[in-house]
């Protein structure tokens, strides 16, 4: 209920912001740039497909060899199905459980949850590194305005904390999640029977933490492949921005496209619960484009094209989700 309310409030604010940015920038000016894209949009879709493919491969490598019989394409379909709903609602709060559920009983629940958790940790840390690199370059080489400078400094501080904390916790195998959960349970629950039941559930959290620690410590080949997948994810984002901006008539370098993608990662992290980043992406990309010397309409057009691309993949994901529900319904009916 709370996640739905959060998504609804975020959507209303985002839509209002979206309308404001579009009206302020000029619909005709934005439309002219989008029309320049033409058939190039197919190329944009193809580049963006790489991102879903490499993260699905990353997820597969985060599973144990025994569980990989599920196959790459099943994970790809589950990822698209989960992210379709996540993009439309409260982000990963909805998307991640749906990805696990979309796999049905093809692999154990423990494997689904553990592998997804490891994959998301590597994605989050790699995104933080991306944001950190972009923030440092922007702060040292561009005259950012007051609000944008404060935002980049805050982002830089946040990602440094996340990276350092992640390295320390995983390196020293600190079971913070299960430890805090047990401490809170013992502080809040007086009934011995209920406490024993809760502690039996917390054991599963401790097992998840062990899986995470063992992955990074004992599976170097898989870890290396996962890192390559995450690098490919971010690089394809840079290429997508580079190609899109070129097609709409903006002349930029790959280095500038990298900066724009790093800020886009920061927006995705900071406003993860805003459905489809509506409004936020348009405003943030417009201000960044102006700071980098481009027309604000270039930035808004880029964000709108990114939004159209996103909804194309959401449509595909919804088809997969409906197909999964239909299959599960048939299985339940057969059992009856």
Image (tube, rainbow, N blue to C red):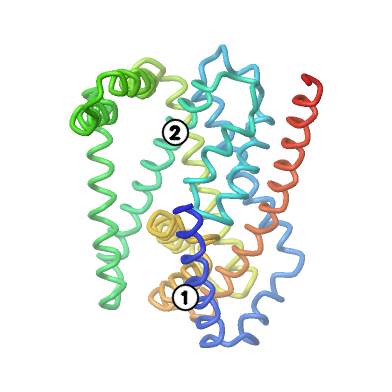
Residue at screen point 63% across, 57% down: 310
Q: Secondary structure at mark 1?
A: helix
Number of residue marks: 2
State which mark lies toward you, 2 or 1. 1
Instruction: Left or right? Give the position of 34 relative to 189.
Output: right
Q: Which quadrant holds residue 196?
A: top left
Could you give the CA–CA distance between mark 2 and mark 1, rounded to whole angstroms? Answer: 31 Å
Residue 204 disc label:
none
Q: Is residue 106 above or below residue 283?
A: above
Q: Is residue 102 visible?
A: yes
**Quarter holding the C terminus?**
top right
The residue carrying mark 1 is 286
Q: Position of residue 249 (x, y in %)?
A: 61, 75
Q: Is residue 261 visible?
A: no
Residue at screen point 74% across, 58% down: 42
Q: Position of residue 173 (x, y in %)?
A: 25, 22
Q: Nearer the viewer, residue 86 or 73?
A: 86
Q: Which quadrant holds residue 124?
A: top left
Residue at screen point 47% across, 72% down: 13
> Most extreme residue toward the top, as rendered?
66
Q: Nearer the viewer, residue 329 or 159?
A: 329
Q: Nearer the viewer, residue 273 or 258?
A: 273
The residue carrying mark 2 is 227
Which is more N-terminal, label 1 or label 2? Answer: 2
Q: Secondary structure at mark 2?
A: helix
Instruction: Left or right? Give the position of 80 relative to 155.
Output: right
Q: Position of residue 93 (x, y in %)?
A: 47, 46
Q: Position of residue 155 (x, y in %)?
A: 29, 58
Residue at screen point 53% across, 30% down: 59
């Amino acid at each position: 209920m709370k996640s739905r309310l959060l998504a609804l409030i975020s959507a209303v604010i985002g839509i209002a912001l979206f309308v404001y940015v579009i009206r302020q920038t000029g619909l005709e000016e934005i439309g002219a740039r989008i029309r320049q894209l033409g058939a190039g949009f197919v190329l944009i879709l193809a580049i963006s497909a790489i991102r879903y493919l490499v993260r699905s491969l990353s997820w597969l490598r985060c599973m144990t060899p025994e569980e990989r019989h599920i196959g790459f394409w099943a994970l790809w379909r589950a990822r698209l199905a989960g992210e379709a709903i996540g993009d439309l609602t409260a982000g990963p709060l909805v998307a991640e459980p749906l990805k696990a559920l979309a796999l049905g009983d093809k692999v154990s629940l423990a494997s689904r949850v553990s592998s997804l958790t490891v994959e998301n940790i590597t994605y989050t840390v790699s995104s933080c590194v991306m944001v950190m690199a972009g923030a440092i370059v922007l702060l040292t080489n561009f005259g950012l305005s007051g609000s944008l400078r404060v935002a980049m400094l805050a982002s830089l501080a946040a990602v440094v904390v996340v990276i350092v904390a992640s390295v320390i916790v995983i390196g020293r195998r600190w079971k913070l999640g299960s430890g805090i959960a047990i401490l809170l349970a013992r502080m809040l629950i007086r009934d011995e029977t209920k406490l024993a039941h809760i502690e039996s559930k917390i054991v599963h959290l401790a097992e998840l933490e062990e899986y995470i620690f063992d992955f990074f410590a004992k599976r170097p080949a898989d870890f290396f492949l996962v890192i390559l997948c995450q690098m490919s994810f971010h690089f394809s984002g840079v290429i997508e921005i580079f190609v899109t901006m070129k097609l709409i008539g903006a002349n930029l370098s790959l280095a500038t496209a990298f900066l724009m993608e790093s800020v886009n990662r920061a927006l995705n992290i900071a406003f993860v619960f805003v459905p489809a980043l509506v409004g936020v992406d348009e405003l943030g990309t417009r201000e960044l484009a102006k700071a980098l010397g481009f027309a604000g309409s270039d930035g808004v057009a880029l964000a709108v094209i990114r939004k159209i691309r996103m909804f194309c993949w959401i449509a595909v994901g919804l088809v997969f989700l409906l197909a999964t529900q239909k299959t599960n319904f048939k299985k339940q009916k057969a059992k009856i």
